[in-house]
Image: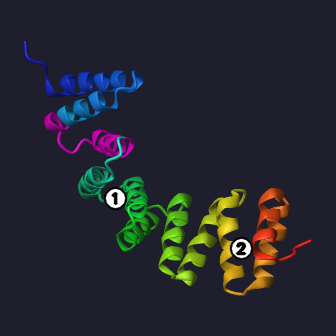
Amino acid sequence: MPLTASVRVRVLRFRAWVALAAGRTDAALAVFDRLLAVMPGDRHALASRADLRERMGDRQLAIEAMNELVAAYPGDAAGWFNLGYLLEASGMLSRAGEAFLRACELAPDLDQAWFGLAQVRIREGRLDEAKAALENNTRLQPLSPHGWYQLARLHAECRSDDEAIRIIRHLYGFEPRVAARLERETGLVAR
């Protein structure tokens, strides 16, 4: 008796899980490809395929897979964020910025997307936009030092020393090592 599509999908998902648990990424990738043949546009399979291709070192195929995901699910902020990450890692800054911005529009509370957008804008030399993105990131993640660190560096680079010192003082309240590192790197003294 032939399996229904629903049962076949569940069996394939289980096989992919077993392959991943066994560390067999190539086998898992093949299973996800079979799953997509049975259930085209399956969100989990598309995302998993992109992740596995990246893990296997084929970023271009990972980008293609993630492009398939955002084409099938244009409202998926996580998909846009992951696409932005892959594009940035490939040096495709303009497209990465667009993907991160789309993720921010879809999920304004996705702090990682704001941080990714800021990183791209810094690399593009669009520092005012980077500052705005970092301000959103630090508002959403007030105790994460990464956004604060980058924001202080930007202010120091733009000769807004008072603002950089204010951020370094703020960091001394919960991340003194990061604050001390900023003082060493920028030459600014906040204490």
Closer to the camera in the image, 37 or 22: 22
Number of other residues with Cα within 10 Å of mark 1, as a class: few under 14, some 14 to 19, many 20 or more: some
- Residue shown at 85%/60% (left/top)? 173
Q: Label 1 amino acid?
A: Gly
- Residue 174 in sight: no
Mark number displayed over residue 152 = 2
Closer to the camera in the image, 24 or 51: 24
Closer to the camera in the image, 22 or 11: 22
x and y percentages locating residue 76 in the rendered image: 36, 55
Q: Which image quarter is the C terminus in?
A: bottom right
Q: Is residue 32 left or right of residue 137?
A: left
Mark number displayed over residue 75 = 1
- Residue 160 in sight: yes
42 vs 21: above or below: below
The residue segment tinted magenta is 36-55
Quadrant of the rendered image containing residue 80 = bottom left
Labels 1 and 2: the sequence-earlier one: 1
Q: Label 2 amino acid?
A: Ala
Magenta stretch, main secondary structure, is helix
Number of other residues with Cα within 10 Å of mark 2, as a class: few under 14, some 14 to 19, many 20 or more: many
Nearer the observer: mark 1 or 2; the answer is 2
Tell me, yes or no, whether the highlighted magenta stretch contains residue 86: no
Cα separation, mark 1 vs mark 2, equals 33 Å
Label 2 secondary element? helix
Q: Which image quarter is the N terminus in?
A: top left
- Residue shown at 18%/32% (left/top)? 34
48 vs 147: above or below: above
Name the outermost residue toward the bottom.
159
Q: How is the image coloured?
A: rainbow
